[in-house]
């Protein structure tokens, strides 16, 4: 693990190229109260049922860092899109995209519209993502 001394982000590779730019967390949720509610609930559930994570607020999205950068959240007007890696393609109606990242892993994108979507099933999937690189 390498920690960038200017932005504090951690990476697997030393001197990993990246942008050090971060933005205030609340910027992501301007006029997006619903997304904020969903994000807070999701973070609570992950922290409670899976493990601790840090919030990294980047200009493009919010990253959650558990054992690695395991989830990206993109606040939308009335929903929250999340992206995470798995070693399989998800079979889920809410799945919007599944893109191969390597021969073994796929990036899955899901849209959460209600706290009811953050259920046992989703948390089990996120647990898989959280521990993928451990
Ligand atoms: Zn940096």
Image: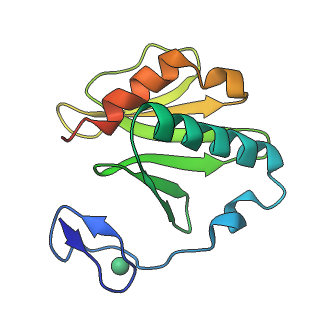
Residue 50 found in image quarter: top left
Front in this rendered view, residue 100 or 49? 49
Left or right: 39 in relation to 11:
right
Q: Residue furthest front?
A: 48
Left or right of 131 on screen, residue 38: right
Depth check, front residue: 125 or 79: 125
Residue at (36, 76) in percent of width and height: 8
| The N terminus: image quadrant | bottom left
Residue 2 in picture, x, y percent from top left = 19, 71
Q: In the image, is residue 54 above or below residue 9?
A: above
* Residue 122 seen anywhere in this rendered image of the structure: yes
Q: How many marks?
A: 0
In the rendered image of this protein, does residue 24 appear above or below residue 112?
below
Q: How is the image coloured?
A: rainbow
Residue at 79% over, 40% down? 78
Where residue 5 appears, x then y in whole percent?
Answer: 30, 85
Q: Which image quadrant: the C terminus?
A: top left
Q: Is residue 107 above or below residue 53?
A: above
Q: Residue at x 18, y 30 (%)?
A: 104
Instruction: Name the residue: 56% across, 43% down.
Output: 43
* Residue 89 in picture, x, y percent from top left: 35, 21
In this rendering, position of residue 1 left or right of residue 4: left
Q: Could you say where residue 116 lies in the image, as x and y percent from the top left?
A: 69, 21
Question: Looking at the image, which residue sits at the far bottom?
Answer: 6
Quadrant of picture, ligand 1: bottom left
Q: Is residue 100 visible?
A: no
């Amino acid at each position: 693990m390498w920690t960038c001394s200017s932005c504090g982000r951690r990476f697997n590779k030393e001197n990993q190229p990246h942008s050090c730019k971060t933005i205030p967390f609340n910027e992501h949720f301007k006029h997006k109260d619903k997304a904020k509610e969903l994000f807070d609930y999701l973070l609570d559930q992950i922290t409670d049922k899976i493990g601790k994570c840090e919030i990294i607020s980047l200009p493009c999205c919010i990253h959650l860092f558990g054992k690695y950068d395991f989830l990206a959240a993109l606040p939308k007007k009335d929903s929250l899109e999340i992206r995470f890696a798995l070693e399989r393609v998800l079979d889920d109606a809410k799945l919007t995209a599944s893109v191969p990242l390597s021969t073994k892993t796929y990036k899955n994108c899901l849209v959460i519209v209600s706290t009811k979507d953050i259920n046992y099933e989703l948390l089990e999937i996120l647990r898989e993502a959280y521990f993928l690189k451990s």
